[in-house]
Image: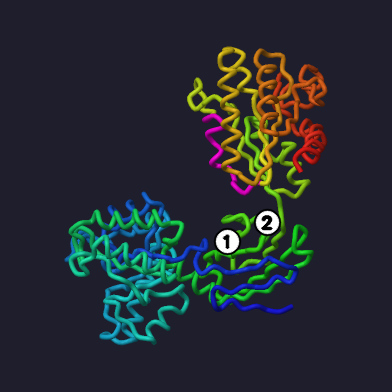
Amino acid sequence: MKKLILTVLPLFIEAAAGAQDIQICKFLGDKQAAVSLTYDDGLLEHYTLVAPELEKRGMRGTFWIIGNMVGLDSTKHGARLSWEQIRNMEERGHEIGSHTWSHPNCRKVGMEAFMYDVWRNDSAFMHNVGHKPLTLAYPYNAKTDNAVAAVDSGRIGSRTFQVGHGQQNNKTTLDRMTGWMHGLIERGEWGVTMTHGINEGYDKWYRPQELWQFYDTLAAYSSKVWTGTFAQVMSYTKERDALTLNKNITGDGTDSWKMVVTPSCPLDSSIFSQPLTMKVSGLEHNIKAEQDGKQLTCYGERSVRLIDFNPSGGPITLTPTKILNIIGDSYVENHRRPKEETWHYKMAEALGFSYNNYGKNGSCVAFDRTHDGRFNFGPAMYAKTRKMNPDADYVMIIGGHNDAFKVGKNKDTLQMFRDSLELLITNIKEQCPHAKIGYVTPWYCDYPGFKQVCRTIKQVCRRHGIPVLDNYSGRCVIKVRDDAFRKKYFQKPSDTAHLNNAGHDLFLPVGMEWFVRNMQ
């Protein structure tokens, strides 16, 4: 088996069986560029201003701490973070790195004194945070090759390049920052910012709102720019460049192939734990990816799938699969029992499908039940389709039970149900353009509204060419009117909607036979 070394990106691995190619993406999520927002000196403003502004936009920053200034209320450049605040920021997902113990200039104090200062800050972190800082920023940006080699040993890395963002010294404007970001995108590069004070301190901002507006710009460009902490991006690049892959493909390369990709990364996995992104292209079907007994998320375009994986983990198995989305009410969520007991989940398992359950107890096709009495059953189904996996091969709607009660109380609502069902189908077609749609009606119930709702379901679905599994007819295997049947196969003897595990097993062959005959 040929060993393939991924050291130059992009690099394609030719699939022996045909069209499937592998590429390790330059940045996480196949983004065109990466940005790390870093902040020097551990100022209190970083806790009160910067971190909240980042979090509003779903971003996290890297904050470099000077150990002997932690907790000081007054310094030349402003108050400093406390160890409690540092721990809190780390818990919120921000990276906390070292800016040494006393901020010495590496080139002036000498190698031995500098490394002693680094070690003192490591010890303070161990005592107050519980771990050694895995990244470091050099005071005054002063460094030597020997210092970098010594500092990086046992760490993810240290900051060796940056662009200053501030207005007192660097004269930064929103236009300059935005232009810098666009340059990174054009060149496919990683950019690291260096910010100190906000309202006070070194290189403070006269117009801090421009910094927040730049964060808005980064958020708006999230499809192109990965805004990751310094540790995340540095770890990604080092893992990416050190990675080797062994790959084996069996099958005919169309819909019956299997690819096993074995990653090997020589870096210390206790330090380097950033997932990498694999791009698999040339696909005719959706794929399923598994590593170390867990299913990995596949995303991106339908013919080009992206997979985030552990570079220090075990082999990654890729196989073609179909995706089944189920949307509906408690027939889908399964009331008080696990979804894994439902017949549709078991059918997906038997057919080897990826399965997405969008069921909600109490949900209606047509009626918003967000504030229905004392319950919150959520919005109508037609309003929830944007949450569905857009790559689905099949979508099954299982609903109408709760709508029937609404219709039974007010006949004027039947037209509302019809219109909402039309809208639900339209929304599904837009959200899942590759999917075939099917409908499963409720079981027979002797209540007003059920006959009208089920008749309307069949009429609307017939107009759209959607197959219907009609459980309202007397031929259904689920005998709702039989007391002994409900006692054996429903979650409660008085229940008329929710099957227990044995009831789902009873219905499984009926549902699967209908699905295979009408949907595949």
Tag 1: amino acid: Asp
Task: Looking at the picture, tell me which residue is in the foreground, 424 or 346.
Answer: 424
Residue at 63 percent of width and 63 percent of height: 281
Residues marked 1 and 2 touching at CB (< 8 Å): no
**Span of residues in magenta:** 378-392
* Mark 1 or 2, closer to the camera: 2
Residue 470 location, quadrant? top right
* 48 or 279: nearer the viewer: 279
121 w.r.t. 368: above or below: below
Looking at the figure, which quarter contains the N terminus?
A: bottom right
Taking depth in this image into account, of 411 and 493 the one nearest to the observer is: 411
- State the residue position of label 2: 287
Q: Earlier in the sequence, mark 1 or mark 2?
A: 2
- Residue 23 in percent (x, y) is at 59, 69
User: Which amino acid type is shown beneath numbered disc 2?
Assistant: Ile
Q: Look at 33% across and 59% down and name the residue there.
A: 83
Residue 230 in picture, x, y percent from top left: 41, 67
Question: What residue appears at the point 70 percent right and 71 percent down from the top-left corner?
Answer: 247
Residue 383 sits inside the magenta stretch: yes
Any part of residue 398 in sight:
yes
As drawn, is 162 to the left or to the right of 433? left
Check disc 1 and report the residue beneath it. Answer: 308
- In depth, the one of 160 and 29 nearer the eye is 29
How far from the left and from the top, in percent, is residue 38?
Answer: 34, 65
Q: Position of residue 135 (x, y in %)?
A: 41, 71
Q: Is residue 126 something that shows in the picture?
A: no
> Residue 17 lies in magenta, yes or no?
no
Indicate the secondary structure of the residue bearing disc 1: strand
Measure how far apart labels 1 and 2 are at the Cα level.
14 Å
